[in-house]
Structure formats: structure tokens, C-alpha cells
């Protein structure tokens, strides 16, 4: 009976030791993968943002030109009316007539002026990319925290010291510097001026 | 004020205690009902066979619904798959949070319903589904949506769907057994070898368990469900680190009184808040009535979230 209990306890102990060992090993692998994921997200950002930027710029340039043409035409019409010169008035009229087809093309191809939409889209993508990188880092931090806590707490610390599992660094952050200090300037509530 | 790591382990501990309590209770109930059965029917193979059938039947039923939970629930709720272009916010938020939680990206579905709610299902993280209503996506800001979706992802990460399925099987078996017992008692009365003092006592205890067990088991089941909600709220904050997002989302969702038509009792515990709110939650919920809820009162959830930093 007693031998049976001892054998049973031993079996439980061995199973526990194996699963603890596996926790440390697989945690390390997961942390490594999570670090790679940060790189993956950074790469995505590097590919995506310039493309979005240039397409948004293209849209904006196009629309800016139309708005500028329109304003110019309106200005010259106004000044022509003020001057009362017939020739100037007719010139201004033809200037406006030249702009109109352009506007028509834009309005026909995009029922609403797309500039603001394009900018919104760019902002959305920017935030999304920033979020993705932030969450990729979060995973590294959390996995590392789990690993490091298990490494130093009883009973798993026994396994960690037997197999010499080293501490994982996770997201490397300087131990000192501005980010953990509060200067007098920081204590003031920031005021937003637009 | 509670650090998020402390809050997480405290919640896990409480949840484990109640789950263990449930299994102990179910074990005891089963034991006494079995005993009563045996005394009643004699130790013949007939009694055990009958109970075996009951267990296998309810087990199979629940296992099917659990194994195919992702497909079944979505069929009931009339959801369509979300795509990145049309549902940019929902899609990217879910994708990002899954990344942060270390889960594979779940399937994302959307229900075209103006009610504000969301749920998660699927038997494990590889088969997980996150589903939100159109109303939720439209009415919440990105930060608030993150809070809600992170709550759902925590359910997935904690295997809550699996847990609640197992709990439901056991509650169902107890109810089924009790039913069988009462039926056998009245139909074939006096056939068994229930004479003798011990037999009578066991019969009595068995009868008490038969009558009370289904109710008590159900109450514990609901308590587990509520505990898991708190745990998922904590998990949500652990992923987003922005309790305010989930707090605001919960406030918005409570103010919105529209019930979700696609929800039914079987899926209620999956949602972020009770989907039937418009129908019965209008009056103030008393302590007694709140025992029968799948979700803790929103007030308590907000209070718990405000204590987390």
C-alpha cells in the first residue's frame, strides 16, 4: 500500500516536472515568435504607409488643383466685374469654362469629394498599424512576464534552476531615464491649442 | 485600486473555487441519486443501464452542440462573415487584439441588427468565432469596441465555451436523472428491494437530491457564468490596458434598451451583456432575481473595472 502511494506520488511529481519544463521551453519559443511578429508588423507598416501616403497625396493634389482653379476663376470674375471691363469679363468667363469640365470629371467619378475620405482612410490605417505594433509588443511583454514569474516562484523555480532557464528580457526598456521620471513641467496639465 | 495582474489572478482563483464547488456538488448529487436508484431497483443491471443511457444521451446531445457550437450558433443568429473593407473597424480591432492576446485570428461575423451586443463561440481558439451586431460597431468608438472584443477574446482564451458546455451537460444529466427517478418511482412503485432502514434513508436522501439538485446545480451554473464574465472583463483590460473603453462601452450598451432578436436562451451566456434586457431587466433587479442571471449587474462590473489600473 505504502509503496503504491510512493509510486503514485512519484508519477505525479514526474508529470508535474515534465509539464513545468515544457512550460519554460515552449514559453521561450513563443516569446521568440512574438518578437518576430513585431518585426513582421514593422515590415507591414514600412510597406503600407508610403503607398497610402502617395495615393492620398495624389488625390489631394488633384482636388487642390481644382479648388485652386475654381478660386482663381471666381477671383478674376469678381475683379473683372469690379473693373467693369467687358474684355476682362469675357476672359474670366472662359477661364471658368475651362475649369468646369475638370470639376465635372471629378464629381462624376466620385459623387462626393473624396479628399476627406482619403485622409480619414489614411488616419484609420495609421492608427491600425500603430495598434498592431503595440499589440505585438504587448504579447512579448505578457509572455515574458508569465515566464519570468514562473521562473522565480516556488515550486516552478526548482525546475527553472535545475535546467538553468535564464531570465527573458522581453521588451528592452532602459531602467532609467525620462520615461520613469516626472519633471516639474510634466505635472502641469497640458493645454491644447488649435 | 488593484493592479491588473493581481486582479487577474484573484478572478482566476474565485472562478476556480466556484467551478470546483460545482463539480463536487454534482459528484455528491450523482452519488446519492445513484444510491437511491440502486436501493429502489435493487442492484440489478437494469438500473445502471437506464442511468447509463440517460448519461450517454445527454452527453451526446451536448457534445454535438459543443463540437459544432461555432456553426450552430451562427446559424441561429443569422450572421454573415465580416470583411476588412466593409467592416474595417470590427475586422482590424479583432485582428489586433487577437495578436495582442496571442490567439490565432478568430472568424469574425456580423449580425445586421441595430441592437448592441457581441458574443464569442467555438470549441477552442482554433475554431473560435467572434460576432458583433451592426448596432455595436456603429455606436461604439474604436477604443470602446476594443474593450468589448477583448472581453470576447478573453472568453475564448479562458475556454469558457468549453467550460459552460461541460457544466450544461452535467446540469442536464442531473435533471434527466431526477426525471427518470421520479417516473420510475411512480410507474413501477414497490417493485424494488427498498425495504429495510438503510434503504429507506437512502431513498429519502435520494429524493431530496432529485428534487433539489437540478435547481441548485442551475444556480451554481449561473454563478459560474457570472464569475466568468468578471474574469473576461479583467482579461479584456489585461489586453487593452484601457478599462475606460470597456466601461464606456458597457454604459452605452445598457442605455440602449433594444433587445437582440436573434438571441435565445441557449446562447444568452455567450453575449457581452444579457441580450434580453429590454424584456425583463427594466425593473430594478433584486438580490434574489439576480441569482438567476447569466450576467452580473452592469453596475457591479463597472465598479470592478474602475478598481483596476
Image (cartoon, rainbow, N blue to C red):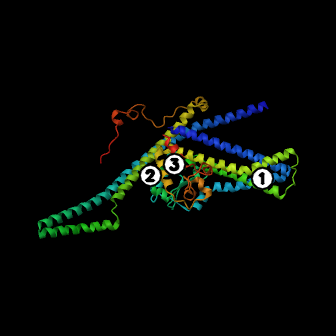
- Spatial CA span between label 2 and label 1: 51 Å
Per the image, the residue denoted by label 2 is B142
Q: Earlier in the sequence, mark 1 or mark 3?
A: 1
Q: Position of residue B95 (x, y in %)?
A: 49, 51
In this picture, is A35 found above or below B251?
above
B88 and B166: which is toward the camera: B166
Please rate how many residues cluster around mark 1, counting C-alpha atoms within 10 Å: few if below 14, some from 14 to 19, many from 20: few
Q: Position of residue A121 (x, y in %)?
A: 38, 55
Name the chain letter of the residue that bears numbered label 1.
Answer: B
- Spatial CA span between label 1 and label 3: 41 Å
Q: Position of residue B256 (x, y in %)?
A: 49, 57
B128 and B36: which is toward the camera: B36
Q: Earlier in the sequence, mark 2 or mark 3?
A: 2
Secondary structure found at label 3: helix
**Which dot marks residue B150?**
3
| Residue B102 appearing in the image | no
Left or right of A77, for residue B115:
right
Per the image, the residue denoted by label 1 is B52
- Quadrant in which residue B129 is drawn: bottom right
Q: Position of residue B41 (x, y in %)?
A: 84, 52
- Quadrant in which residue B197 is drawn: top right
Name the chain letter of the residue that bears numbered label 2.
Answer: B
Amino acid at each position: 500500500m505504502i509503496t503504491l502511494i510512493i509510486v503514485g506520488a512519484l508519477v505525479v511529481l514526474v508529470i508535474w516536472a515534465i509539464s513545468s519544463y515544457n512550460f519554460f521551453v515552449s514559453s521561450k519559443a513563443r516569446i521568440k515568435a512574438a518578437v518576430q511578429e513585431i518585426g513582421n508588423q514593422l515590415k507591414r507598416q514600412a510597406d503600407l504607409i508610403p503607398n497610402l501616403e502617395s495615393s492620398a497625396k495624389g488625390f489631394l493634389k488633384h482636388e487642390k488643383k481644382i479648388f485652386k482653379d475654381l478660386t482663381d476663376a471666381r477671383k478674376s470674375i469678381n475683379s473683372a466685374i469690379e473693373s467693369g471691363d467687358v474684355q476682362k469679363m469675357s476672359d474670366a468667363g472662359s477661364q471658368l469654362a475651362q475649369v468646369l469640365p475638370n470639376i465635372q470629371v471629378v464629381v462624376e467619378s466620385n459623387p462626393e469629394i473624396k479628399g476627406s475620405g482619403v485622409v480619414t482612410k489614411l488616419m484609420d490605417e495609421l492608427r491600425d498599424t500603430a495598434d498592431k505594433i503595440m499589440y505585438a509588443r504587448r504579447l512579448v511583454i505578457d509572455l515574458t512576464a508569465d515566464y519570468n514569474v514562473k521562473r522565480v516562484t516556488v515550486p516552478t523555480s526548482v525546475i527553472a534552476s535545475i535546467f538553468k532557464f535564464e531570465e527573458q528580457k522581453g521588451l528592452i526598456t532602459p531602467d532609467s531615464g525620462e520615461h520613469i521620471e516626472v519633471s516639474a513641467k510634466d505635472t502641469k496639465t497640458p493645454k491644447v491649442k488649435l | 485600486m488593484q493592479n491588473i495582474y493581481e486582479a487577474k489572478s484573484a478572478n482566476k482563483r474565485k472562478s476556480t473555487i466556484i467551478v470546483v464547488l460545482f463539480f463536487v456538488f454534482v459528484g455528491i448529487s450523482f452519488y446519492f441519486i445513484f444510491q437511491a436508484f440502486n436501493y429502489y431497483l435493487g442492484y440489478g443491471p437494469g438500473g445502471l443501464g437506464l442511468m447509463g443511457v440517460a448519461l450517454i444521451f445527454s452527453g451526446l446531445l451536448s457534445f454535438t452542440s459543443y463540437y459544432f457550437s461555432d456553426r450552430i450558433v451562427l446559424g441561429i443568429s443569422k450572421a454573415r462573415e465580416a470583411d476588412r473593407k466593409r467592416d474595417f473597424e470590427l475586422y482590424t480591432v479583432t485582428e489586433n487584439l487577437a495578436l495582442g492576446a496571442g490567439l490565432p485570428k478568430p472568424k469574425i461575423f456580423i449580425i445586421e441588427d441595430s441592437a448592441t451586443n457581441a458574443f464569442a463561440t467555438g470549441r477552442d481558439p482554433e475554431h473560435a468565432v467572434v460576432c458583433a451586431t451592426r448596432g455595436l460597431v456603429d455606436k461604439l468608438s474604436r477604443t470602446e469596441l476594443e474593450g468589448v472584443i477583448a472581453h470576447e477574446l478573453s472568453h475564448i482564451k479562458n475556454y469558457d465555451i468549453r467550460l459552460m458546455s461541460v457544466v450544461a451537460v452535467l446540469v442536464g444529466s442531473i435533471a434527466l436523472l431526477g426525471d427518470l427517478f421520479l417516473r420510475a418511482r411512480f410507474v413501477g412503485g414497490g417493485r424494488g428491494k427498498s425495504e429495510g432502514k438503510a434503504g429507506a434513508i437512502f431513498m429519502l436522501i435520494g429524493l431530496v437530491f432529485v428534487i433539489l439538485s437540478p435547481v441548485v446545480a442551475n444556480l451554481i451554473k449561473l454563478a459560474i457564468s457570472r464569475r466568468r464574465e468578471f474574469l473576461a472583463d479583467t482579461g479584456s483590460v489585461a489586453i487593452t490596458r484601457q478599462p475606460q473603453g470597456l466601461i464606456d462601452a458597457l454604459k452605452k450598451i445598457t442605455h440602449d434598451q433594444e433587445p437582440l432578436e436573434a438571441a435565445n436562451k441557449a446562447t444568452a451566456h455567450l453575449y457581452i451583456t444579457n441580450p434580453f434586457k429590454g424584456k425583463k431587466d427594466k425593473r430594478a433587479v433584486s438580490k434574489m432575481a439576480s441569482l438567476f442571471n447569466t450576467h452580473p449587474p452592469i453596475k457591479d462590473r463597472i465598479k470592478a473595472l474602475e478598481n483596476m489600473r
